[in-house]
Image (cartoon, coloured by chain):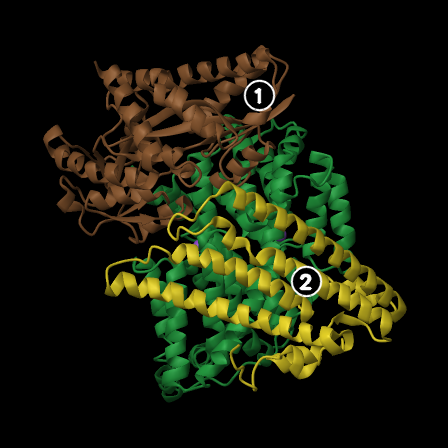
Chain colours: A yellow, B brown, C green
Amino acid sequence: MSKLPSNSDTDYAVVYPSSSPGVLGWLDLWIGRVEAFMLGAGVLLMATNTVANVVGRFVFQHSLFFTEEVNRILIVLITFAGLSYAARHGRHIRMSALYDALPQSWRKVLMIIMCLVTALVMSALAYFSTRYILSIAGSGRVLPALQVPVYWIYIWVPIGLGVTAIQYAMTAWQNLLSDDIYLSTDVKEAHADTVEEASL
Amino acid sequence: DTWRYAFEESLTDVQGEYAKEFKAYIEENSDHSLQLFPYGTLGESADIMEQAQAGILQFVDQSPGFTGALIPEAQVFFIPYLLPENHDELVSFFRNSKAINEDFVDVYAEKGLELLSMFPEGEVVITTKEPFETPDDLNGVKVRVMTNPLLVESYKAFGATPTPLPWGEVYGGLQTNIIQGQENPMFWVESAKMFEVTDVITFTGHNNFTTAVMANKPFFDGLSDDDQALIRDGMKAAFDHIVEYQRGLGERSLEKIKEQKPEIQVNRLTQAQRQPFRDAAQEVEAKFIEMTGERGQAILDQFKADLKAVQQ
Amino acid sequence: MMAWMLGAMIVLLLLGFPMMIPLIVGAMIGFVFMFGGLDQMNFMIQQFMAGIRPASLIAVPMFILAADIMTRGQSADRLIAMVMSFIGHLKGGLAISTATACTLFGAVSGSTQATVVAVGSSLRPKMLKAGYKDNFVLALIVNASDIAFLIPPSIGMIIYGVVSNTSISELFIAGIGPGLLILVMFAAYSVFYAIRHKVPTEPKSSVKERLLAIKQAVWPLGFPVIIVGGIYGGVFSPTEAAAACVLYAVILEFVVFRSFPLASLFAIAKSTGLTTAVVFILVAAGAAFSWIISFAQIPQTLIASLGLADASPIMLMIAICVSFFIGCMFVDPIVVILILVPIFAPLVEAAGIDPVLVGVLITLQVAIGSATPPFGCDIFTAIAIFRRPYWEVIKGTPPFIVMLLVVAGLLIAFPSIALFLRDLAFAD
Ligand code: NA
Ligand code: NA
């Protein structure tokens, strides 16, 4: 785990401590840290990998044969680690014009339904992606340059989907327990804008 | 029933012609109908292959170049100077080869696929910005190849710097000089407008682009004898059509290119000039054996025996 | 089937569900109709992966990262200060510069999303400060970025050229006229907007101030050199140019300007990753949605029902425009081209319309459709990077859509807007 600079991006525990107490809270905190690490490391590795290929081509007259495949692995990692990270921070894109116009009590009910449906869809996808990976693993296909099995590219997919499902389920639960409306486990609706400022 | 057939080129390219002819035959001679899915409409090569293996597509046309990861032996088609350069010999080889019509059928069956037909799409030419006659001339020239390990080996052996790129990036890559050459059958040089961004077309005679049509095996095995026969006959009809369509296709494409770009330079390497490339092919053959082991060796031996039979 | 898919999508969208849910549920309904259940859902995952597979997509996070570093540091400010010293005193000058920068960057980088990020994140704060309203700024950035579809190199035109067997060089040249026409219209609208909303101008800079601004911007001027020179000069592919920009940005901000400690690079990378993920999950879900529509042959059925077999050329071109416009509202443009072009190609040939003109028209519709809700990668990118609500990002769009549709109409009426340059270049 790398040390994050304190003056920078908002972090799970910094602004809004995870609200679920005890072992679960601890687990949640660490899942959040792993997501954040994967996300940042994924982007930095992608940059390093692509730069190295350019340098290799100009300085050593040789492209790196694995650059494209490594980037393919990283883009999946970034997308699916980012999926749950964005869910945690309430950053997924939505069209909220109509929703915002509703009275508070309606919004709360709608938010709970929304979180439950999203959690359900995400867990279904987590299940299907596991099945897909198993079917690919069975076919024995390998990446031509790296010679690693193709399904390795996809390992983060069910994890990201599964964690996202849990995130939304927990948000639904939080909305049931509390008087406020939670956009995600870490972000209250009214605070959405404050968080934006804080993280810039 | 409605059957689905996906392929890797657009409707007006060779694979599209083949598919249209097969569709016409099936729909004329039965109550079944066939939906065609050209390149990209259901995903890339590997995607449509998975869809065919799962049986949601009944037919798929996939070239051995892309099948390499799934069926390594299929890369035998990338060993340079293996296939005959003469059209009639080539056709006769595809019709009669035991390697194609028996051995490969078993290999594909292991992957849940019924191999129905293999056919040539046309002589592969290399288009570049500068002319070349020897492997030395290709030194430092970046030639785009499909993402296939054996093809990469071939171009290394030819003296060039092979650069695997997805085809969507080839035109732009040539235009901006990130690559300086590419290889493809003549019709593709014309239809994908490769001639607009390269200046020399070189006939090296090193290969003829091959492709394969297969069906999902459980689907095929579950059909009545009549339907199986219908499909086999449809494949034969499409093969006959494509053999005729192929005759002179390269020349027709070349004519079209010359009309649009009269200054294009066309080089046909002589047998003597081809010799160093032919010699380099030995390395590629060794690499093929290294990659595929005994099974590859067996297929290659049968392949050579079939070729001998045709060329006598 | 289509009615159920669209109905569910629109309801979920309006209720404020995360945008991936309407797309995924819409696709799921399609799977149920096509396969009688969810047994084949593996292929939704396959298409998720296919959606984020193209190697050219790598340029997006790379340009986001470079832009993130530049805007948090000093490079972007210095570049803008230089431009402002020349055009700050002109009415609408900043808006015109923004539109031009989007067009140029998009044309060269080949990625409209990267353009939204790179140009938008540096110029939007400046425009807001100068007094432009946010919904105008956002709509301008998104729509001007999409002009890049028409200016070479354009991946949409390459795909159209291959599928329809049309000269790609001719398409490239034919796209320039309409592309510039759109830019001019956007510029005129910007001036009109600036006057009507009384956007204040800055005092005219002296020669000395301008020279100082240029001096300040010498290092950051390396970015346009890397991007324009690198790509057109054949040194880099767009993805590599993006990576080179990242390297250059790191060197400038962390070594030359020392804007912040190297340790903060990780936080910037994380924010880049978040922006990328939020957009790419929609690209992935969009690919699955497109796939099931393609598999069910819905476009073929719809277009067959139009009965275009003996339509006049004008009618046919209008039908093409409408089909592509609607298609690109919901589906990724490349897929729309791959599916629809083969359907229309025989009709176009029979009607004797120049395929180059059709290609330009289609590319224009692709540009319009990409900026048109609900599905639009550039809209998503703008939402993710600027953190503005969906509604606010699209609110200012209508005037731009109208201008673009006017250009489409002009093209149909006066094909020489596109074909003039082509005929000049390819005259025998
Ligand atoms: Na462009
Ligand atoms: Na759209």
Task: Answer left or right for A17 relative to B288.
Answer: right
Quadrant of residue B300 within the rendered picture:
top left
Give the residue at x 74% y 58%.
A118
Q: Nearer the viewer, residue C160 or B272?
A: B272
**Secondary structure at numbered mark 2:** helix
Q: Nearer the viewer, residue B177 or A115?
A: A115
Q: Where is residue C278 in the image (x, y as percent from the top left)?
A: 61, 63
Q: Dot 1, how many residues are within 10 Å of its Cα: few (below 14), some (14-19), or many (20+)?
A: few
Q: Which chain carries label 2?
A: A
Q: Where is residue B223 in the image (x, y as percent from the top left)?
A: 61, 18
Task: Answer left or right for C5 relative to C339.
Answer: right
Give the residue at x 28% y 61%.
A57
Answer whether labels 1 and 2 touch (C-beta < 8 Å).
no
User: Is C403 rendered above or below residue B277?
Assistant: below
User: Is C261 rendered above or below residue C235?
Assistant: below
Residue placed farthest to the front in the image? B294
Give the residue at x 25% y 23%.
B84
Q: Identify the disc placed on residue A164.
A: 2
Quadrant of residue C296 within the rendered picture:
top right
Whether residue B264 is visible here, answered yes or no, is: no
Check disc 2 and give the amino acid type: Thr
Residue at which label 1 appears: B221
Q: Where is residue A77 in the image (x, y as percent from the top left)?
A: 53, 61
Whether residue B194 is visible here, answered yes or no, is: yes
Check disc 1 and give the amino acid type: Asp
Q: Where is residue B20 in the image (x, y as percent from the top left)?
A: 50, 22
The nearer-to-camera label among 1 and 2 is 1
- What is the spatial separation of the Cα atoms under label 1 and label 2, in whole angstroms? 42 Å
Give the residue at x 30% y 60%.
C235
Q: Which of B93 and B107 is in front in this view?
A: B107
Q: Which chain carries label 1?
A: B
Labels 1 and 2 positioned on one and the same chain = no
